[in-house]
Amino acid sequence: MVLTLLAVLALIAMVGFMTVGANGRWSFVLPFRGAKLAGMVLVAYAVAVSTVLFQTVTNNRILTPSIMGFDALYVLIQTLLVFHLGSLRVTEIDPRLMFLGEVVAMVLFSGLLYRWLFSGEGRSLHLLLLVGVVIGILFRSITSFLQRVIDPNEFAVLQDRLFASFNIADTDLLLVSAGMIGGVSLVGWRIFHTFDVLALGRDAAIGLGVDHKKAVTLILVIVAILVSVSTALVGPVTFFGLLVASLAYQVMPSSRHKHILPAATLIAILCIVGGQVVLERVLALNASLSIVIEFVGGLVFLTLLLRGVVR
């Protein structure tokens, strides 16, 4: 019942995005808005699924993939490009080349972390999280230093690039993103039966016959690719995944992944698409949706932290 209601609300939001305030020829409006809608749906799916799966393997509903330093790496890449090339040359780079470069950098970063983690005995997932936090701090420190010495005009351009934007209309990027997300989703579908078992904890999962190390490694790779693609598409969204995952756990009567994953995805679609409709078409505001989402997500994070909802 809850999933049906969420699906109906998400569908209403998508129809509203495609039709509200549509002036001009439909032959132009539909493909243009359709591309943006497809991008938002892809990002919503990637963020929601990656966050839920990451919380499953870490057994903690407060942590998100951003703790691994993906957002910090993205910001560092953008800062290095503007620092060395200048904002004018950066804007001239082919968006497809930029997208692929960012995805490859983030996936390689996660791959090196995972290889180091699982290459020896006695190294745990908690150690991986700690290393991710430390590396994220390192990336932020380097970024902060470069931003302090950068030209003020260049810094203004850089700041604009660092705000997440959900207005994606490049069909080439969407096709590549859809292919990558679809590929890792197929891998995830093959090990879907292990998700609920992994949520019980490492010892319980091993006792029930799950190859814990293999399953966790696959899920972390899936999470890394989903986060890399979504971040490269729209920019860093630190608390969005936490927001939709927390809402999904609250509204669903069951914590099984066959309920939580679609619920989180539908809530993410509703937040992004519905938020764009309300901000741009209904209220006619020029405010950035990502700022609103991050603000609400930050409040949710503080609420969870104060309540001590740690699994």
Image (cartoon, grey):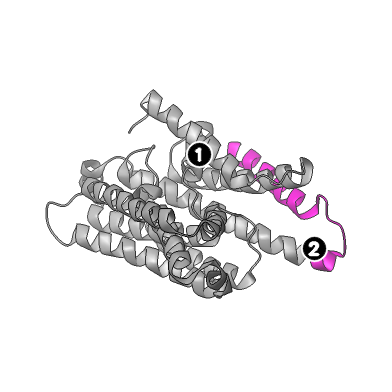
Along the line of sight, which residue is nearer the eye, 163 or 170?
163
Which quadrant holds the N terminus?
A: top right
Residue most extreme to the top:
307
Residue most extreme to the left:
121
Mark 2–mark 1 Cα distance, whole angstroms, equals: 31 Å
Residue 8 lies in the magenta stretch: yes
Task: Let me know if residue 233 appears in the view.
Answer: yes
Which quadrant holds the C terminus?
A: top left
Is residue 222 shown above or below 247? Answer: below
Label 1: which residue? 243
Label 2: which residue? 29
Q: Residue at left 19%, top 49%?
A: 124
Label 2 amino acid? Val
Is residue 239 shown above or below 77? Answer: above
Packing grade of label 2 (10 A; few <14, some 14-19, many >=20) is: some
Left or right relative to 117: residue 280: right
Along the line of sight, which residue is nearer the eye, 209 or 257?
257
Label 1 amino acid? Leu
Residue 14 in percent (x, y) is at: 71, 51
Left or right relative to 101: residue 268: right
Left or right relative to 226: residue 41: right
Local secondary structure at mark 1: helix
Residue 64 in percent (x, y) is at: 40, 45
Q: Which residues are magenta?
A: 1-29
Q: Please, what is the dominant secondary structure of the magenta stretch?
A: helix
